[in-house]
Amino acid sequence: MNNNIQHPLFGISPKLWYQLLINNDGFDPSFFPRVFFISMTSFWTMPFRAMFNLRYKRAIKKSSLTGPPIFIIGHWRSGTTYLQELLSHDPQFCHVSLWHTMVPSCFPILDPFKKGLSTYLPTTRPMDNMEVAADGVYEEEAGMAVIYPYSFFHCFHFPRNAEKQYASAIHFDGLSKQEIDEWKKQYLFFLKTVSYMNPQKTLLLKNPANTARIKSILELFPDARFIHIYRNPYKVFFSTMKMRTRVLDVLALQKSKKEDIKRHVFNDYTQLMKSFFKQKELIPEKQFYEIKYESFVKDPLKQVQKMYDHFGISGFSSAMTPMKGYLESKKNYKVNVYNIDEKLVQKIKKHWGFTIEKWEYDVPK
């Protein structure tokens, strides 16, 4: 499917789609093919959303999660996906998939059509070319963009309104208590739907946006466990810049400027991490585990075993074989290499020095 047409807002309702366009200053004419595609598919999926509500909604509302969910948090490009993909090979866990985020309001109904509809999904991630499958791990934030007007992914859909979307979606700035409660309601129901379709399995979730939502998550799941992974901030900057630029090429409905992207990356990281350090204290010690990305990639299984021991999770020995298979499949993966400009290094140090010093990182060679 042509990238000028395919779009992950495939399963959005017409009402929410109209609301998004009004609230975010519409779209630029050059992106009309994407807008037309979203508009048509939003109407096409209407009967399936109605069928889902009739068949599943009541039962899912009454359902409970299997054990406390595990939340992998950390700034974008810090290794959250790699960590989740490895852990997802433990059969006791279930996860939000790319397919779930495409049609979060009716994927149980549309499962028989998944193979055909998957042609609308990308086969690789635009930011790093890692393979991605319909059933592969994905962040639930993308699904929230389809069912709620505030999501980090709307920063990519409507880059002219990125600052406001970021503040509203992640920090709930400017939102009323009613709007925040509605976010919690929608988020909980989405996760319950995934859990309902994966009985007796524990939710393993990865969503960098949740790094600054710890208070709200604990209000929903008091026993939730958090794994925070962090990485050299210099590398995070360059990788995030590349990620945002490439994702905008695929998802944007408005034009953007490189200088705006750079400003957003600097400001968003600062806000996210400062909010995390403040909220981190709310997590009971036994429910929190922190890992350094560089230590993780050096010996992933050793780090995972420590993690299991900390949380008291059983089953590591039986999960080792599939985890080893996954690591073997990724052994030839090459990380991105960046040309580091001295002026930019100084700017990163100026803005992000609070994490660089805290975690004792040097400028990468």
Image (cartoon, rainbow, N blue to C red):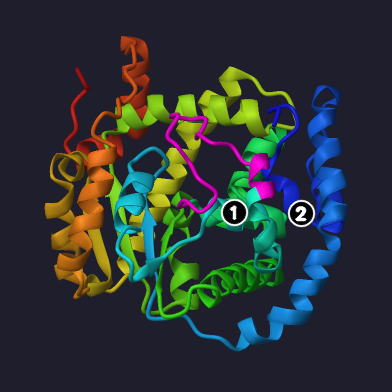
Residue 159 to residue 317: above or below: above
Disc marking residue 99: 1
Q: Mark 1 is on which residue type?
A: Trp
Image coordinates for residue 353, horizontal then vertical, percent: 29, 33
Nearer to us: label 1 or label 2: 1
Left or right relative to 44: residue 337: left
Residue at image coords 22%, 22%: 363
Residue 359 to residue 192: above or below: above
Residue 213 to residue 218: above or below: above
Between residues 360 and 292, which one lies in front from this camera angle?
A: 292
Q: Quadrant of residue 203?
A: bottom left
Left or right relative to 18: residue 314: left
Circle 1 crowding by C-alpha within 10 Å: few under 14, some 14–19, many from 20: many
Q: How many marks?
A: 2
Is disc 1 in contact with disc 2, using a CB cutoff of under 8 Å?
A: no
- Whether residue 149 is in magenta: the answer is no
Between residues 119 and 166, which one lies in front from this camera angle?
A: 119
The residue under label 2 is 12
Q: Specify the quadrant that holds the N terminus.
A: top right
Image coordinates for residue 89, horizontal then vertical, percent: 32, 58
- Whether residue 121 is in magenta: the answer is yes
Left or right relative to 211: residue 87: left
User: Furthest-bottom residue in view?
Assistant: 62
Q: Quadrant of residue 343?
A: top left
Q: CA distance from mark 1 to mark 2?
A: 14 Å
Whether residue 169 is visible here, answered yes or no, is no
Q: Earlier in the sequence, mark 1 or mark 2?
A: 2
Image coordinates for residue 358, horizontal then vertical, percent: 21, 42
Q: Specify the quadrant that holds the C terminus.
A: top left
Residue at image coords 87%, 45%: 40
Span of residues in magenta: 116-137
